[in-house]
């Protein structure tokens, strides 16, 4: 695969020779390192690497010289990492709605949202464009020209969330995943439908190598501690049933109950405690773990897709959502691993 390098002005300079590039992006990391022979060194900090029409690329932040091995290593953030290094700020007094995106300026009680929350509505792709513009990334990043066809309605960004997590969460609220592609000099960030391979009869799990671990017991009772002191403190009990469905009704007792606490003393409302508590319990409950390996020709999974597998020897089966993609690029070789969770 050709790995092209371009300067700070985003002008192509050439193709890397003899490189070895490792990238990870998704729930965490969102960075890369690229090793080349010292005599092939050609890049500077602030330059970019990319493979055309793929999601592989990013900005070089650090250079390391390994004189004993006669190597140079470029470290940096992937496109996803660049998004993650920006912060979605709460509403400001200068924010205004656009032709395609509506900003909510006050809550249901008429209290201004300035300095509190950013709440927007509009087609998902137009909302992406709005956030990219707000983050100062529109010189390189943009949404597809066409609409996503899914309408974001009153999505409230977490306070001071990073750009990557904020956009992913916004898209997930309307059943979409983030699609990233570098093409024709732009990083295209779009919202596309998530795919559930675990229910796809045409998907053959024998085509991939799967390391499967099924955790039968997981936290199913989360005691959420809100604001207040002692007996005046807000306490909310959340429960997950055997299938991971979350409610305020307990279904597992005695030895089947697995409890934990979640401390959120700075919470501003009971609604916010409920929202964050549910998110926390989803993370803790995750009963299934898989690592999936496949070759470059099988690169059809994206972060946000759901996959499933059954082991013929033990009978263990599980399904989970892809949360991270780990890629190794060489000029003549590509390998891809996936980490999954809820």
Image (cartoon, grey):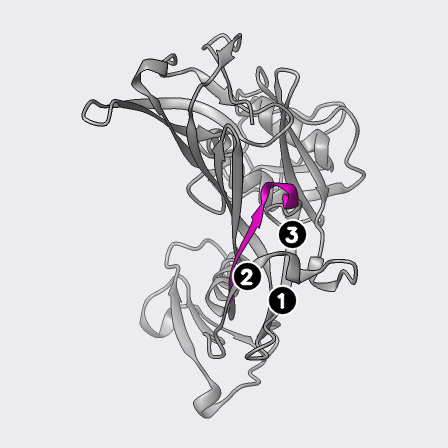
Residue 97: quarter of image: top right
Crowding at label 1, few (<14), some or many (≥20) Cα neighbours within 10 Å?
Answer: many
Indicate which disc, 3 or 2, sits on the residue closer to the N terminus. 2
On the image, the x and y values in percent for residue 300 come to 67, 45
Residue of label 2: 210
Q: Is residue 273 above or below residue 116?
A: below
On the image, the x and y values in percent for residue 103 come to 66, 33
Nearer-the-camera pick, 303 or 167: 303
Crowding at label 3, few (<14), some or many (≥20) Cα neighbours within 10 Å?
Answer: many
Crowding at label 2, few (<14), some or many (≥20) Cα neighbours within 10 Å?
Answer: some
On the image, the x and y values in percent for residue 142 come to 64, 23
In the visual, does 6 lie left or right of 119?
left
In the visual, does 335 lie left or right of 20?
right
Evaluate if marks 1 and 2 touch, with contact meaning CB atoms under 8 Å apart: yes
Give the residues drawn in magenta, as a range: 289-299
Which numbered disc, 3 or 2, marks the residue closer to the eye? 2
Residue at x-position 57% and y-position 53%: 322
Evaluate if marks 3 and 2 touch, with contact meaning CB atoms under 8 Å apart: no
Q: Residue furthest bottom?
A: 254
Nearer-the-camera pick, 232 or 70: 70
Residue at x-position 52% and y-position 22%: 3
Q: Is residue 170 above or below residue 19?
A: below
Marking on residue 122: none
Residue 247 seen: no
Instruction: Quadrant for the N terminus, please.
Output: top right
Residue of label 3: 305
Evaluate if marks 1 and 3 touch, with contact meaning CB atoms under 8 Å apart: no
């Amino acid at each position: 695969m050709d790995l092209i390098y371009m300067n700070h002005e985003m002008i192509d300079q050439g193709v890397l020779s003899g490189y070895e590039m490792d990238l990870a992006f998704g729930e965490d990391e969102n960075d890369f390192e690229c090793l080349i022979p010292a005599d092939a060194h050609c890049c500077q900090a602030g330059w970019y690497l990319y493979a055309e029409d793929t999601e592989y690329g990013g900005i070089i932040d650090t250079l390391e010289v390994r004189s004993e091995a006669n190597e140079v290593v470029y470290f940096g953030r992937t496109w996803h990492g660049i998004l993650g290094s920006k912060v979605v700020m709460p509403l400001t007094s200068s924010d205004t709605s656009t032709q395609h995106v509506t900003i909510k300026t006050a809550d249901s009680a008429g209290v201004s949202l300035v300095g509190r929350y950013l709440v927007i509505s509009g087609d998902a792709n137009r909302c992406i464009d709005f956030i990219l513009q707000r983050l100062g990334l529109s010189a390189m990043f943009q949404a597809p020209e066409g609409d996503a066809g899914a309408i974001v309605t009153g999505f409230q960004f977490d306070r001071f969330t990073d750009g990557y997590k904020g956009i992913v969460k916004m898209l997930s609220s309307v059943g979409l995943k983030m699609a990233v592609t570098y093409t024709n000099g732009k990083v295209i960030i779009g919202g596309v439908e998530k795919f559930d391979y675990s229910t796809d009869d045409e998907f053959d799990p024998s085509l991939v190598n799967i390391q499967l671990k099924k955790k039968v017991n997981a936290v199913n009772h989360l005691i959420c501690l809100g604001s207040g002191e002692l007996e005046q403190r807000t306490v909310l009990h959340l429960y997950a049933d055997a299938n991971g469905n979350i409610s305020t009704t307990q279904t597992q007792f005695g030895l089947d109950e697995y409890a934990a606490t979640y401390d959120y003393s700075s919470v501003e409302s009971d609604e916010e405690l409920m929202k964050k508590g549910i998110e926390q319990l989803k993370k803790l409950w995750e009963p299934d773990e898989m690592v999936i390996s496949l070759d470059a020709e099988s690169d059809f999974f994206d972060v946000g897709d759901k996959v499933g597998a059954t082991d013929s020897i033990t009978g263990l089966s599980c399904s989970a959502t892809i949360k991270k993609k780990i890629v190794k690029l060489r000029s003549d070789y590509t390998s891809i691993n996936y980490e999954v969770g809820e």
